[in-house]
Amino acid sequence: MSEEKKDLAPYRKHLEEEWNLPPELQKALIQSQDVISDFALRVALWASRRYLIPLSTLAVIPTKQGPKPYITARGVEFILHHKGDYSVDVEILQWPEESNGYTARAKATAIVNGRKFVDYAQVSLDQELRKNPRANPDDVLHKCVTKAKRRAGLSAVGVPLPLYEEVIEGEYEEIKEIDEEPKPKKLTIPIFLAEVKKLGYSIDEALRALGVQSATQIEDLEQALEELRRKKDADPRGSSRAEEDRRRAEG
């Protein structure tokens, strides 16, 4: 028995174990921002068997054409780990600086059993600020390197599925859920910060009012936003603390 077959035996066993699980446990393995329907499970099982990808490394997103399977970055790493010798090199083609609009460009080369797979990524500060108002050039560079490595890894895997992480990061804007009635938007940090600004707070003011240093420390964004609304209603002109200081100064 060859070394390659010995290496693939545990991988195949892992796949078989997932395929033989009850449907409800299979659904729990698949990543999704929605409830996994029976049809979505069948789509994921088809992709798993067709491309020999574990269910636990797949995601399903509803689209206008129906549920669509995606591979996760974890799935790419999992498969590459079982392919043999694997490494990835990254070359920074452009550092994010003021002269280039803080845009980073990177080239990643994945090497699997001596074969090379190359892919690229480009990320700008403007892109990141839309998702994170506190993004900085270091974040841009890190994101660019990560994307290049993911893409090179996907090329090495050779699976014709999009990367789930790029979808949820807004890389594929055509993805839309197919409910007849639109669902209320789930409150994310970018949406929360946008609502904070509508209330007339600066981000720093809002964080101080909530007693945290970063929005990522807020456990319940809905509750935090409601608390800021109550504070605003109690002092419609802005900061009650500033008003009290002014009154004390006058007195």
Image (cartoon, grey):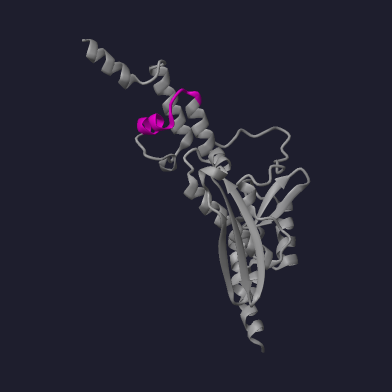
* Outermost residue to the right: 65
Residue depicted at 74% across the width and 52% down the height: 39
- What segment carries the magenta color? 198-210
Q: Is residue 116 above or below residue 127?
A: below
Q: Which residue is drawn at 63% across and 85% down?
A: 3
- Snapshot quadrant of residue 236: top left
Residue at image location 55% in from the left, 40% down from the top: 131
- Taking depth in this image into account, of 29 and 250 the one nearest to the observer is 250
Q: In the rendered image, is residue 19 in sight?
A: no
Left or right: where does residue 92 sit relative to residue 5? left
Task: From the image, give the main secondary structure of the stretch colored magenta.
Answer: helix
The quadrant where residue 86 appears: bottom right
Residue 200 belongs to the span the image colors magenta: yes
Q: Which residue lies furthest to the front in this view?
A: 99
> Is residue 8 toward the left or the right of residue 233 in the image?
right
Residue 78, given in percent of the width and then of the height, sits at 59, 67
Dividing the image into 4 quarters, which one contains the C terminus? top left
Which quarter shows the N terminus?
Answer: bottom right
Residue 206 placement (x, y as % from top left): 40, 30
Query: To which quarter of the image does residue 25 belong?
Result: bottom right
* Residue 173 x/y as whole percent: 69, 42
- Taking the image as drawn, is residue 250 in sight? yes
Is 244 contained in the magenta span?
no
| Picture mark count | 0
Q: From the viewer's perspective, is 39 left or right of 236? A: right
Which residue is nearer to you in this view: 218 or 34?
218
Front-most of residues 233 and 197: 197
Residue 81 at x, y = what percent? 59, 72
Q: Which of 25 and 160 is in front in this view?
A: 160
